Image (cartoon, helix red, strand yellow):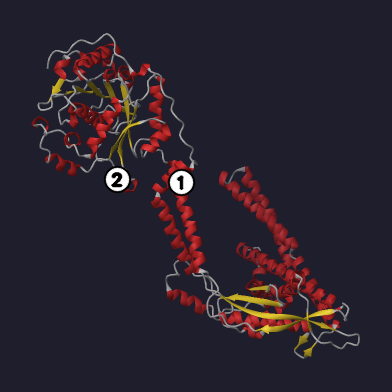
Amino acid sequence: MAKLRSTPEHVDSYYDEPRAEIKKSPGMFDLAYLFPRLIARWHWILIGILLGIVLGVISIRMSVPEYRSTATVRVKSQNSGSMGNSSESDDIDLQSREAAEDIRSDFDRTELFLAVASNPTVRNLANLIPPDAPSVMEIFTAKEAKKAEEKNVFADVPEPEQLSGIIRGWTSSEVRRGTRLIDISVNHTDPDVAQVIANQIIQQFINIREGVNEEGKKSDLQQVLAAAKERESELETARRRAGSYTPALEAEKEMAVAEKAIQDLSIRYGLKHPKIISGTDHIKLKTKILLSAMKDVLSSDLETDYWRGFQNQIDDIENEENFKDLRNAMKLRASLLTNSVETKNELYNTLLSRVGVLKTDAEGVEAEVIKHEDAPRAWAPFSPNRKKIMVKNTLLGLCGGLALAFMFQYVDNKVHGVADVEQTFGISILSAVQKLPPEEELLEEMESLRDLPVSMKHISPTLAVPGWKTDFVHSEMFRVLRASISLLGDANQRKITMITSSIPGEGKTFCAANLALAYAKQGTRTLLIDFDLRKPAVHKIFNEERAARPGIVNVLNGTAAANQAITVYPGLDTLSVIYSGPKSPNPGELLEPGRLRALIGMFAANFDHIVIDSAPLLPVPDTRILAPLVDNLALVIRADHTPVKNIQSALDMLKDDGVSSSGVILNDFTENRFQGGKYGYGYGYGHYGDDA
């Protein structure tokens, strides 16, 4: 080419202008910002919903079906005369909710459930004790579930006192609103059991209220008093039995505390540590105290019958294994006696209440309960409510999916689209370059090009296809980039454009080469310079050898003139390229600001547009030296790749140097994020500055 003119006296810089303030990013809980990003993670929401549905199905399969049978009683009043004669029955006034609840509360008495639990009809029922819920592994194995069901048909029936509490848990009572009817409902896994128990509760309730026993009607106050006195004696005996265990239980608790303390110390200290030795001695002392207390309670006259079967172990109680077994058996026996005291106390209080009722004025109004309707057999399960379970678990799954989507959004530190850049950094987008098609498709497109100069047949399809296939979507994107830069200001003051990035691997060389080609195809004299002296890549996109010809390194170290380093391809005379050239042992020392200013000024005097591909900002300082000498600085951000903190660090670095970015090129973005995929064109950086 012709000899280059010397540099003009002054090169205007865009960075002499005031810098725009960077806007703050929206908060994490800004719904307008958050909602589309959660929807973009729809797969996590869908997974949550599917898991909720699966859990709902498992919950239904694990649930044992329950049937409900309901018996109904009606309440009437009976007026007694002074001579003991009964008058005609009239409906009792139950308009008051409190009065109805008083009668309904009688169905919660321990005496009633104890009578039901003692009834032979109830105790001889098959499937009286419900089967255990199947495990997760058993729910899909019908054979195992059938075995479990058969096993429970003739399961051992608990003692009446224990069974009464179980039946109480199955039973509920409710006053039917606006009526004199009380419904007694029993839920059970066997519909026949539910029916029998519901009817028995009604029958036993009526019997207790009317004072009927096996020999006939029995409502004498003296008999109730005798029963109360008998229960009082039983209660006192139970209390003495339970109280006999108090010293031993207190000693056992103290020993348990000592054992826990020595266990905690053994984690931190060795066996010979003073604290371990002291703790061991303390346990020996507590063991002696507990042994003494256990011997007293095990030999007590009150509990002789119970402990007779343990006599062999009691005789050798100082044996460690026997001591451990008897200690656990003592705690279990004490717990059973405590529960027995509570049950007997409740029954005794019930009898006292009954005595109080019988002592009331005989001429007062006494409620009479009569059977209104027997409990029918239930033919369909009352629970589980499959629809309710599925809706509940699906909603829980939806919430879980949204929580997962929010969590991934919260920890997401990448830029994904144009909105992310604008909202997070407040920087304008010069152009958004979509993800390139696969390499095979680009090669096919390149083979179909007819006007590609012969001298450029060897260049990369990532440059050839966008450059010469005008209807290719990426061609339009780089024309948009060219137009965006031209709109930044006067063309004579916007000639020098530098393309850089915050970190390697963002596609800045791809963008720089295609921008230079877009300028050249417009008919303007364009120079593309590879100022990435440590890891150059412009020669790769033109499919050239790095050291095959002089480059910018030769120009800077004085081994070649500027016009000797320029490469022009026949067929596209408007595009000139200066490659990086051979590897320099000291690239940082070549970038002397004064020499660079003169060199770039000389290029500006001979070309309409200059595009510089420079090194990334964060790894090396090269770009910071060049930045004040250019008119436009475009920062390439690769979608789904560049961490936000790296972008912010690069912008802060430029700001500290007194320069700012003209805008951002969003590279490799996917218009439809649901398609996923990775960028097919790699920058090729490893440790920045090492040879590939």
Instruction: Name the quadrant containing residue 669.
Output: top left
Q: Is residue 48 above or below residue 591?
A: below
Position in image of residue 435 (x %, y %):
27, 40
Instruction: Name the quadrant containing residue 553.
Output: top left
Position in image of residue 58 (x %, y %):
46, 65
Position in image of residue 467 (x %, y %):
18, 33
The C terminus: image quadrant = top left
Residues 169 and 23: in front is 23
Q: Is residue 321 left or right of residue 413?
A: right
Q: From this viewpoint, which residue is outermost toward the right?
A: 82
Q: Please give the label number shown on residue 677.
A: 2
Residue at 28% x, 16% y is: 591
Q: Please give the label number shown on residue 45.
A: none
Q: Is residue 89 above or below residue 623?
A: below
Q: Which residue is mark 1?
A: 406
Q: Is residue 528 visible?
A: yes
Residue at 81% x, 74% y is: 353
Alpha carbon of mark 2 to alpha carbon of mark 1: how far? 22 Å
Q: Kindly identify the amino acid type of the residue bearing the numbered disc 2.
A: Gly
Position in image of residue 199 (x %, y %):
65, 82
Q: Are marks 2 and 1 in contact (CB under 8 Å)?
A: no
Q: Kindly identify the amino acid type of the residue bearing the numbered disc 1.
A: Phe
Circle 2 packing at 10 Å, graded few (<14), some (14-19), many (20+), is few
Q: Is residue 512 above or below residue 83?
A: above
Residue at 74% x, 69% y is: 342
Residues 569 and 145: in front is 569
Q: Is residue 582 visible?
A: no
